[in-house]
Image (cartoon, grey):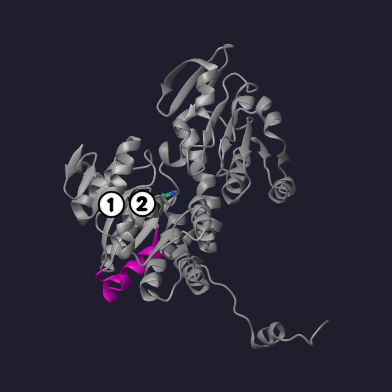
Amino acid sequence: MARGNGYDVKDVRLAAAGRDRIEWAKKDMPVLRSIGDRFAKEKPLKGIRIAACLHVTTETAGLMQVLSAGGATVSLCASNPLSTQDAAAASLVRHDGIRVFAVKGENRKTYYGHILRALAIAPHVTMDDGADLVTVIHTGKREYLDNVIGGTEETTTGVIRLRAMADKGVLRYPIVAVNEARTKHFFDNRYGTGQSTIDGILRATNRLLAGSCFVIAGYGWCGRGLAMRARGMGARVLVTEVDPLPALEALMDGFEVVPMTEAAKVGDFFCTLTGNLHVLRREHFEKMKDGAIVCNSGHFNVEIDIPALARLSKSVRTIRPFVEEYRMRDGRALHVLAEGRLINLAAAEGHPSNVMDMSFANQALSVEYLVRQRKKLEDKVYDVPEPIDREIARLKLMATGVRIDRLTPEQKKYLASWEMGT
Ligand code: ADE
């Protein structure tokens, strides 16, 4: 472990390898790069201290560099104990002078210790993926509230937690919900999760998806993306839902929709993406086939009731990295991937840079917005302003070399009128 006053990473000697990987990621992040170029000239974040709690990946490293280029002082900790890419963390420490507190596989105590060390810079802005910084500040470290001007939130689960805080009147600073930008969830949640979840399952298991029965719990943006990609790999896809609307949508998208008690009997692969607790539990484990593979791609490791599975089992062993075999008392074996934590970040590398480009462009521009609007915003959860969302889409299309049409004056007039019918 490499520890210093301003960092705690696995090994700073991984820095050179990390720098190459970060460079590789940034090649596919043109929007973030263009924001970085502007930030370097204009320094819109001069004097701003940012504490970020994100998955410490090569893409996150790119974002940290952009914030630093904009004049901010940044500290970074992990938003999940298993998602850190140690080489990227080392490179940020050695080459960018950023305070990083993150080691892949850290235990719960270290995880929360790292959050406290990241917060020790007394941030003006918090940047969360799951709302842990906001929660720690509001529950135990209220002295930091004096400095904070606002925060950003990356993910659906975090936005739900923060809206609950705002509804209860306990949120003490404004938050920009980056997840709600269309240039975030249309692409990151759908295409990012779709591809990276399959990637994680395949890296962990090397099993064939073609011809298998793949059960997806939850048909939000992430579930939709995964269903689409699992079908593309030749699996028969079953969807489970609790909400009639997405259930209907899954049906009309061509998937079988069934209750989990039915799906449990036939699934070869199960993946939870609901944001809720104990979606797979004892009653389901009791019905699953021998050899079934169970994983989660939702933010927290609460969707699979692993303690209940352990109680049904007589032994547990790691049969491959990220694959735990639970040998049940009745002789069946069920396999849990990555301890029920985000499979796409634990066993693979998270979403590809191309979608994180837009997510992190939203992060960078939302921080700039918070700084510009400071004192004008209330203690509420705000959407990313529409002009920012549109501008990111425009820049992405431009970088991809795709041109689109413009409305003619006649069309503009038609859209603005109500008198014209057929
Ligand atoms: N969340 C999902 N994929 C990610 C990535 N590659 N980097 C940071 N956060 C992520």
Q: Which residue occupies 22% across, 42% down? A: 14
Which residue is more in the foreground, 311 or 55? 311
As drawn, the label of residue 118 is: 1
Q: Secondary structure at mark 2?
A: strand
Q: Amino acid at mark 1?
A: Ala
- Identify residue for label 2: 53
Which residue is more in the foreground, 274 or 90? 274
Q: Is residue 378 visible?
A: yes
Q: Which residue occupies 57% across, 11% down? A: 331
Q: Secondary structure at mark 1?
A: helix
Q: Is residue 19 visible?
A: no
Residue 44, magenta (yes or no): yes
Q: Residue furthest right?
A: 422
Quadrant where the N terminus sits is top left
Marks 2 and 1, how far apart at CA:
8 Å
Q: Determine whether 378 is above or below 95 in the image.
A: below
Which of disc 1 and disc 2 is earlier in sequence? 2
Label 2 CB sits under 8 Å from any ligand 1 atom: no
Question: Residue 143 lies in what quarter of the image?
Answer: bottom left
Q: Are marks 2 and 1 in contact (CB under 8 Å)?
A: yes
Crowding near pointer 1: few (<14 within 10 Å), some, many (20+)?
A: many
Q: Describe residue 344's horizontal placement relative to residue 255 as left or right.
A: left
Question: Residue 126 lies in what quarter of the image?
Answer: bottom left
- Residue 346 lies, in percent from the top left, at 41, 38
Q: Describe residue 79's horizontal placement relative to residue 297 as left or right.
A: left
Residue 63, magenta (yes or no): no
Q: Amino acid at mark 2?
A: Cys
Bounds of the magenta segment: 29-47
Quadrant where the C terminus sits is bottom right
Crowding near pointer 2: few (<14 within 10 Å), some, many (20+)?
A: many
